[in-house]
Amino acid sequence: SSSFFFGKLPEAYAFLNPIVDIMPVIPLFFFLLAFVWQAAVSFR
């Protein structure tokens, strides 16, 4: 299963662990960026 794959990554892919940890935050970052941009355009 995918959970087993991500839970026990091979040593060759150990460098991807920080990327996998940050991936869930990326959509929140884009949402915040879009919100700030919309607010800047609205209050200009």
Image (cartoon, grey):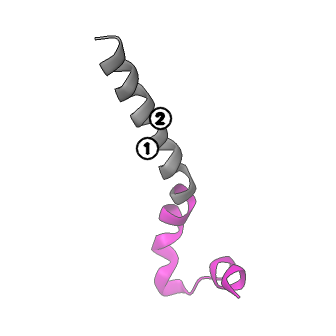
The reply to whether the magenta stretch includes residue 25 is: no
For residue 43, side relative to residue 17 (left or right): left
Q: From what the image shows, is residue 4 above or below residue 24?
A: below
Task: Please tell me whether residue 13 belongs to the stretch shown in magenta.
Answer: yes
Give me the residue at 51% from left, 76% from top.
Answer: 14
Residue at left offset 71%, top offset 79%:
3
Front residue of 24 and 34: 34
Q: Give the side of residue 10 with respect to residue 12, left or right.
A: right
Q: What type is the residue that disc 2 sits on?
A: Leu
Prevailing secondary structure class for the magenta stretch in the rendered image: helix
Q: What residue type is labelled 1?
A: Phe
Label 2: which residue? Answer: 32
Residue 30's label in the rendered image is 1
Check the image and report above or below for 41 versus 34.
above
Q: Is mark 1 on a helix, strand or loop?
A: helix
**Residue 42 quadrant:** top left
Residue 36 image point, x, y percent: 40, 26
Quarter holding the C terminus?
top left
Pointer 1 with pointer 2, Cβ within 8 A: yes
- From the top left corner, tell me how far across and down residue 21 is, in percent: 57, 60
Q: Residue at x 59, y 82 (%)?
A: 9
Please tell me whether mark 2 sits on a helix, a strand or a loop: helix
Q: What stretch is highlighted in magenta?
A: 1-22
